[in-house]
Image (cartoon, rainbow, N blue to C red):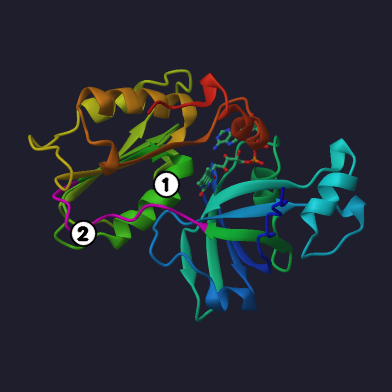
Amino acid sequence: MPTTTRRPRPQHVLTVESTERLGPRLVRVVLTGEALADFGAEEFTDAYVKLLFVSPELGVEPPYDLAALRESAPAELQPLTRTYTVRAIDREARRLTLDFVTHGDTGWAGPWAQSARPGDRAVLMGPGGGYAPDPDVDWHLLAGDLSAVPAIAAALEALPSEAKGVALLEVEAESDVLEVTAPDGVQVSWLVNPDTDDVDFLARAIDAAPWPTDVSEGAVQVFAHGERESIKAVRRSLKEREIPRAAISISGYWARGRTEEAFQAEKRTPVGRIGD
Ligand SMILES: Cc1cc2nc3c(=O)[nH]c(=O)nc-3n(C[C@H](O)[C@H](O)[C@H](O)COP(=O)(O)OP(=O)(O)OC[C@H]3O[C@@H](n4cnc5c(N)ncnc54)[C@H](O)[C@@H]3O)c2cc1C
């Protein structure tokens, strides 16, 4: 039988140009590098990249031979990837903007972003992506937590000026609220929920939204992403409303108490599924 080998995904080696704290839990990191001249995924507002974390102890330089490292590196030095939305890309100026939720000193990407300084190196793969707001849809619902704010803010900026809908953004504190640009007909609501155990909070807000009577395909479009358990509740709510599946972009972006490795691995088990 012929063996199939996966072609390694191209890696972009970039440099931190600047960082900015946008709020108590959000840090913006602007990356620069020639590789951004022909960066793809123009068509998606939820374009994302995979940041690569390779321990300096391995003594290797990018682009990394990930397949070889996965074979040879000891378990505690395995290369790691972390997924981040392209908040903005300026190919001409060679600038890529990523916004990182910071969540204490656990994990890799959050702490990296908190301490990133101009001149630091960042290696990433991508972009991927799958959603863009359809300008012909009558009503848009965009919902998520702080990890989805970069994608939702990018979608709001891409909507035509006459677009209608609501954006429901769940945050832990008033101080997390940011300025976002949205069409006049799209009501942006920042919803403060300090109780991180209340995973039905966003779903309740979606239930209470001013839904149009016609929710058929072409009439509505939904983008809902964030913490996995909260997104499961959102999925149940959308199902009750019989929103057509094709009109919905929905997924967990992370799961409380799980590293990205555990979160990705659990997608293959019942707890990791957000519902069809
Ligand atoms: C397509 C896609 C796009 C994404 N875009 C963004 C983005 O633009 N900005 C962004 O911040 N995140 C984004 N995420 C989520 C991000 O990939 C995860 O939050 C990731 O786990 C962070 O990695 P880490 O190394 O900081 O923490 P990990 O090592 O993965 O986890 C360590 C601990 O931190 C907790 N943790 C992880 N993320 C959060 C969080 N957001 N809030 C509170 N606790 C957390 C985990 O539950 C775990 O207990 C996106 C995810 C996907 C799939």
Main SS type for the magenta part?
A: loop
Residue 146, position in %: x, y? 46, 41
Relative horizontal placement of residue 118, taking residue 86 as reference (left or right): right
**Which label was assigned to residue 135?**
2
Relative horizontal placement of residue 75, taking residue 211 as reference (left or right): right
Q: Can residue 204 be seen in this view?
A: no
Compared with 125, 192 (above or below) is: above
Q: How far apart, in angstroms, are the residues tagged by discs 2 and 1?
A: 20 Å
For residue 257, what is the image quadrant?
A: top right
Residue at 33 percent of width and 33 percent of height: 191
* Magenta-colored stretch includes residue 206: no
207 vs 17, nearest the viewer: 207
Relative horizontal placement of residue 209, taking residue 112 as reference (left or right): left
Compared with 145, 70 (above or below) is: below
* Magenta-colored stretch includes residue 134: yes
Mark 1: which amino acid?
Val
Whether label 1 lies within 8 Å of ligand 1 gets the answer yes
Mark 2: which amino acid?
Pro
Residue 215, position in %: x, y? 14, 37
Ligand 1 quarter of the rendering: top right
Screen quadrant of the C terminus: top left
Q: What is the span of residues highlighted in magenta in the rendered image?
A: 128-139
Count of number-bearing discs: 2
Q: Is residue 64 visible?
A: yes
Secondary structure of the residue carrying numbered label 2: loop
Residue 198, position in %: x, y? 42, 18
Q: Name the residue under label 1.
A: 149
186 vs 227, nearest the viewer: 227
For residue 213, what is the image quadrant?
A: top left
